[in-house]
Amino acid sequence: MELNNIICGNTLDVLRTFEDGIVDLSITSPPYNKQEKHKGWLVKNVKYDTYKDIKTEEEYQQEQIDVLNEIYRITKEGGSFFYNHKTRWDRGQMFHPIQWLCKTNWVIRQEIIWDRMIAANIRGWRYWQVDERIYWLYKPKGNNKIGEELESRHALLTSIWRFAPERNNPHPAPFPITLPARIIHSVMNGCDGLVLDPYCGSGTTLVAAKLLNKNYLGIDISSEYIDFAVRRLSNASSEKQIVDEELQRHVVQKTFQQRKEKGEFTGRFKSDAVSDNTIVASQQKSLELDLFC
Ligand SMILES: C[S@@+](CC[C@H](N)C(=O)[O-])C[C@H]1O[C@@H](n2cnc3c(N)ncnc32)[C@H](O)[C@@H]1O
């Protein structure tokens, strides 16, 4: 297999040609089976150029289970897969990614909430759904289902990630490069290894892997998206600053243990953190000011 390459094809067929235990880390956002319906006013609905995102839900979930299990097979023991998805509804019936993740071989290590702060659908059927999920899936090493601890320098990151969706990218559904950069830097640290994105689209994961000196492999069904990803990879240095900004978040001055030993503050709650109450209070304040002006 040629490393640092993108393969054009149906991901399940391509994955089936790979040997066991070759990948260290996979990161992906698959198509969400959104039926290509236009459900919002803020942005256009997602339509891919080659693939039609309109399977039956049963077909879709079974295909995702098959892809997840193939990636499990080709992942090394102790390796991880970060799987970005979201909760969806069809005629009032909710579909949650946990429904099919529980049917795979993976150990679910963590559910991360990605607060995108904005989303296309602004109808009032529910509270405005601005979150997506990122599942950290783990392939145990022997009987150890827990795995290694993250290094202390990543300790300021929580299970809620807050950054906006990508806007400077012609692909219909890219994620921002901050997302794969955070994952690769946290999970692989300084180690060498192979990063896979089985639905790589515009190549965001691959560019992050390249900038962080990892080997990468991408798969996508669209030759047009692959051409774009190849051009993007050849110009990867232009995205280095965003990746470097992410790396700055992985610094702690003193570890929890060091602070505890010195009797210093060990709580993690920051008094300047913005809660919903603070936002409501400040909106209320400016409303009151408007009324008085
Ligand atoms: C949500 S997008 C991924 C976007 C990517 N994370 C990025 O930042 O550009 C999903 C991608 O899956 C591809 N795709 C859909 N079905 C596929 C299949 N069966 N095999 C391979 N790729 C597929 C689409 O062409 C699309 O580029």
Image (cartoon, helix red, strand yellow):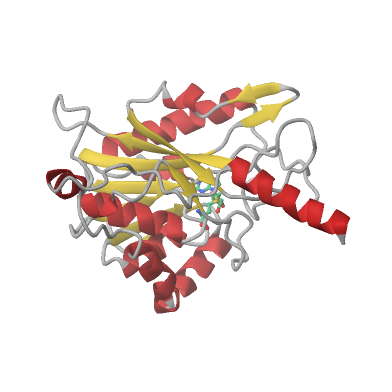
Query: Can you give x and y, in whole percent of width and height, for residue 285 in the image?
Result: 73, 51
Judging depth in this view, the residue of 93 and 153 nearest the camera is 153
Query: Can you give x and y, in whole percent of width and height, for residue 170 in the image?
Result: 63, 66
Q: Is residue 79 above or below residue 47?
A: above
Q: Quadrant of the C terminus?
A: bottom right
Task: Kindly give the residue lying farthest to the front in the view shown.
Answer: 292
Judging depth in this view, the residue of 249 and 39 nearest the camera is 249
Query: Can you give x and y, in whole percent of width and height, for residue 35 in the image?
Result: 70, 37
Please say whether residue 43 is visible from this viewpoint: no
Q: Is residue 123 above or below residue 191?
A: above
Query: Can you give x and y, in whole percent of width and height, for residue 62 in the image?
Result: 50, 26
- The residue positioned 30% from the left and 58% from the top of the image is 250
Query: How many circles with numbers are drawn on the protein?
Result: 0
Please say whether residue 83 is visible from this viewpoint: yes
- The residue positioned 57% from the left and 64% from the top of the image is 224
Judging depth in this view, the residue of 89 and 155 nearest the camera is 155
Q: Quadrant of the N terminus?
A: bottom left
Q: Is residue 86 above or below residue 225?
A: above
Q: Is residue 129 above or below residue 58?
A: below
Compared across the picture, whether 260 is left or right of 115 comes to left
- The residue positioned 51% from the left and 29% from the top of the image is 97
- The residue positioned 33% from the left and 67% from the top of the image is 210
Compared across the picture, whether 258 is left or right of 175 comes to left
- Residue 158 occupies quadrant: top left
Judging depth in this view, the residue of 252 and 6 nearest the camera is 252
Compared across the picture, whether 138 is left or right of 293 comes to left
